[in-house]
Amino acid sequence: MASQEEKQAQPFTDIFDEDEAEKSFLLSKPTCFIILGKPGSGKKTLARKLAQVWNCIFIEALEVIQMNIHEETEYGLKCQELLFKGQSISEELVTEMILKKIESPEVAHFGYVLSGFPSLSEEYMTVSQQIEKIKNLNLKPDFLINIKCSDYDLCQRISGQRQHPGSGQVYQKNQWDPNVIEKHKKENDQHEEENEEEEETAEDPLMSEFLDQFVQRPEDILENAEERVRRYKDIMLHPLEDLMAEQDCQYLIELDGNQQPDDLFVVSKQCTNLVN
């Protein structure tokens, strides 16, 4: 009876000691994200930024290929062999590397931000099969972040991209086109901070010295961009809509893809922080 009275006298006593609390934290599931959206909507850029802030592992096809080659894993050696022969890396091999990375101890501890999977390519697995893989992961995604953008706006943005061959860096039209840069400066005259950012972009040596070297990649030609978006809507849109419909609405975040990458990141970070 005295014991019961003692408990009532100290109703807010923490039943966990420090070691137990730390153990509980370490055993808790890490936060995991999947970034969805049409081709060219900015999934990779957003995923990389979120991974840095949340200290998660960024997982994307090119990223896992480069990582395996650098670490000379069995997969990496296979990739190198194919590349030395002038052959492409199969979709099956890429998918295996992505799933292997998701199942790694590193990801089990830190969580992941997955971009570009499911893939539009159905060379190895259909979109529905890829989505089933996601549903059956040991570490299922906590957040689905869908970047929405109209077909017209997206295709115009993609077709305006240019690449500097030397660095491989891809620039948006508002970064390399002097006319667009000047127009934006005039529109933002009352916003000092934004003007300063635009001035920094205009002073980039690549803009002034190497502008004539910029090239348009084949996938960024307007007709090709429109075809990629059409294939996305034909092949991937409905399966992804079903996946999102199954997601708890508070963990489904839809973003306006017409926003600048930094603004897109800020909104997504705010949303995930609010939920957590």
Image: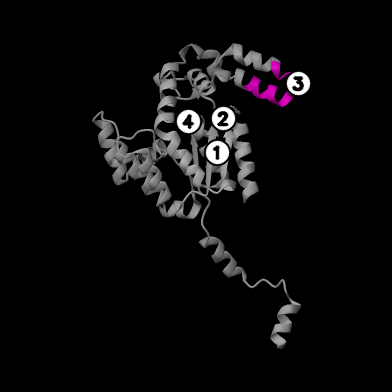
Residue drawn at the location 48% of the way across and 18% of the way down: 159
Q: Which mark is residue 257?
A: 2
Q: Secondary structure at mark 2?
A: loop
| Image disc number at residue 190 | 3
The residue at which mark 1 appears reads as: 49
Disc 4 to disc 1, C-alpha distance: 18 Å
Residue pictured at 58% horizontal, 35% vertical: 255
- Left or right of 99? Residue 22 is right
Real-space Cα separation, disc 4 to disc 2, in angstroms: 10 Å
Q: Amino acid at mark 2?
A: Gly
Helix, strand or loop at disc 4?
Answer: loop
Please identify the dominant SS of the magenta region. Answer: helix
Find residue 208 and report its image quarter.
top right
From mark 3 to mark 2, how far is it between C-alphas? 25 Å
Question: Over which residues does the magenta segment extend?
Answer: 187-200
Check if residue 30 falls in the magenta segment. no
- Contact, mark 4 vs mark 2 (Cβ under 8 Å): yes
Disc 1: CA contacts within 10 A as few (<14), some (14-19) or many (>=20): some
Secondary structure of residue under mark 3: loop
Q: Which mark is residue 38?
A: 4
Q: Of callouts 1 and 2, which one flags the residue occurring earlier in the amino acid sequence?
A: 1
Position of 67 with respect to 272 (left or right) is left
Are the residues at dot 1 and dot 3 in contact (C-beta closer than 8 Å)?
Answer: no
Q: Earlier in the sequence, mark 1 or mark 3?
A: 1
User: Which mark is first along the chain, 2 or 3?
Assistant: 3
**How much space separates mark 3 and mark 4, taking CA atoms?**
34 Å
Q: Nearer the viewer, residue 104 or 32?
A: 32
- Amino acid type at image mark 4: Lys
Any part of residue 127 in sight: yes
